[in-house]
Image: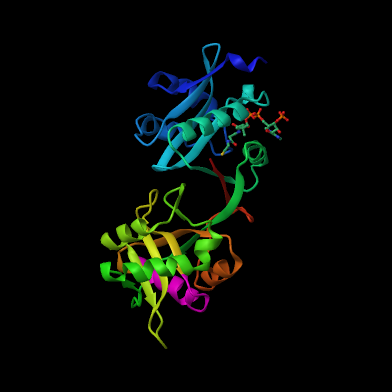
């Protein structure tokens, strides 16, 4: 195929029917693209793109700026009848060029641990696997809460804690903001504190200093769940802190806790000991984050 015949351009409302049609059976359970299409079309954070060949839409993909210099790619789909012709390769190269042109210093995406075709395509473009996140869930538990909501006077200590934490390093400095991972910075911690969504865990014996921090948020798909967007703690305290976060959920009138834990065995062990279970039935499920600095 002559690849020059492919035009990659911003999507329009008129493209939706074609996109819905070819994404119906992306996965066994369908696809989320039809549900997000309208919102993506008007998302001020970055364009929804389509690839067109001879007037027919054959691929889709979204570029989203999570910050002025961080681009996030998602939703890449090639029409099943047009695969293995280099469309995705070209689409991704276009997205990277566009992200760079619009000021991105880094581009990231997440994909399933076993989506080998896309691993190969992104690796060809110089993207590297930098972290893996695994979903975990737990029931909320009624009981006295030991963690405390941090206030602005705690900001410096909280940020120093993040910088020194193992989780920060193992997670490539990223935190989960709803199927998208963004660089954790002091402003984000300050925002969590300002909203009452930064919870601290202090050592009970010894110095009483901060030994754990969690950034909470509303779950984007389950209103009964507390979401932990980032959590780190001294390993010796991790199980107790993770358990306490189940009580935080109950105290906030919620039924469950959802989190994406960075795939670091001591963290997983601590959360399992605190009553959390993998959120996927698939035994080895994990989301791989790929990253490229531009
Ligand atoms: C993954 C996907 C986007 C690939 O699109 P595509 O246009 O067929 O990919 P390309 O033709 O550009 O493939 C480039 C290279 O990737 C590899 N590749 C692509 N699909 C492959 C497959 N099914 N099996 C093995 N390797 C594959 C090959 O190395 C290929 O080069 P080659 O054809 O010269 O051997 C497409 O299969 C798709 O839409 N899948 C479902 C949705 C999905 O997985 N999206 C990504 C989620 S982040």
Magenta span main SS: helix
- Report the number of numbered marks: 0
Q: Nearer the viewer, residue 210 or 159?
A: 159
Residue at the image position 40 percent from the left and 21 percent from the top: 12
Q: Position of residue 161 (x, y in %)?
A: 42, 70
Left or right: 140, with 288 as reference point:
left
Tell which of 271 and 154 is nearer to you: 154
Task: Please give the range of residues in magenta.
Answer: 233-250
> In the image, is residue 11 above or below residue 174?
above
Give the residue furthest to the top.
54
| Ligand 1 rendered quadrant | top right
* Residue located farthest toward the bottom when viewing the structure as drawn: 206
Is residue 235 in view from this perspective?
yes
For the N terminus, give its image quadrant.
top right
| Residue 122 position by quadrant | top right
| Residue 67 image offset from top left, x and y in percent | 39, 44
Residue 138 is left or right of residue 252, and the answer is right
Quarter of the image for residue 151 reads bottom left
Q: Is residue 108 magenta?
A: no
* Of the pair 122 and 196, the residue shown nearer to us: 122
């Amino acid at each position: 195929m002559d690849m020059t015949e492919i035009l990659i351009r911003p999507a329009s409302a008129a493209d939706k029917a074609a996109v819905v049609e070819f994404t119906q059976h992306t996965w066994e359970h369908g696809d989320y693209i039809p549900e997000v299409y309208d919102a993506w079309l008007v998302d001020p954070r970055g364009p929804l793109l389509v690839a067109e060949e001879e007037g027919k839409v054959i691929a889709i993909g979204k570029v989203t700026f999570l910050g002025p210099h961080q681009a996030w790619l998602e939703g890449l789909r090639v029409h099943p009848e047009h695969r293995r012709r280099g469309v995705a390769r070209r689409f991704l190269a276009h997205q990277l060029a566009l992200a760079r042109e619009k000021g991105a210093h880094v581009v990231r995406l997440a994909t399933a641990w076993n989506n080998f075709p896309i691993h190969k395509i992104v690796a060809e473009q110089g993207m590297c696997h930098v972290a893996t996140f695994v979903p975990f869930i737990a029931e909320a538990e009624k009981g006295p809460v030991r963690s405390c909501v941090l206030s602005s006077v705690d900001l410096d200590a909280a940020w120093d804690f993040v910088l020194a934490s193992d989780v920060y390093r193992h997670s490539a400095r990223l935190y989960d903001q709803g199927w998208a991972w963004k660089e954790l910075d002091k402003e984000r911690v300050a925002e969590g504190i300002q909203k009452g969504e930064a919870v601290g865990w202090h050592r009970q014996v010894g110095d009483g200093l901060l030994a754990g921090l969690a950034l909470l948020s509303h779950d984007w798909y389950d209103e009964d769940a507390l979401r932990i967007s980032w959590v780190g703690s001294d390993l010796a305290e991790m199980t107790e802190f993770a358990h306490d976060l189940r009580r935080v959920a109950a105290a906030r009138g919620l039924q469950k806790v959802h989190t994406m834990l960075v795939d670091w065995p001591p963290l997983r062990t601590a959360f399992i000991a605190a009553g959390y279970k993998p959120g996927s039935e698939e035994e080895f499920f994990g989301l791989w984050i790929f990253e490229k600095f531009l």
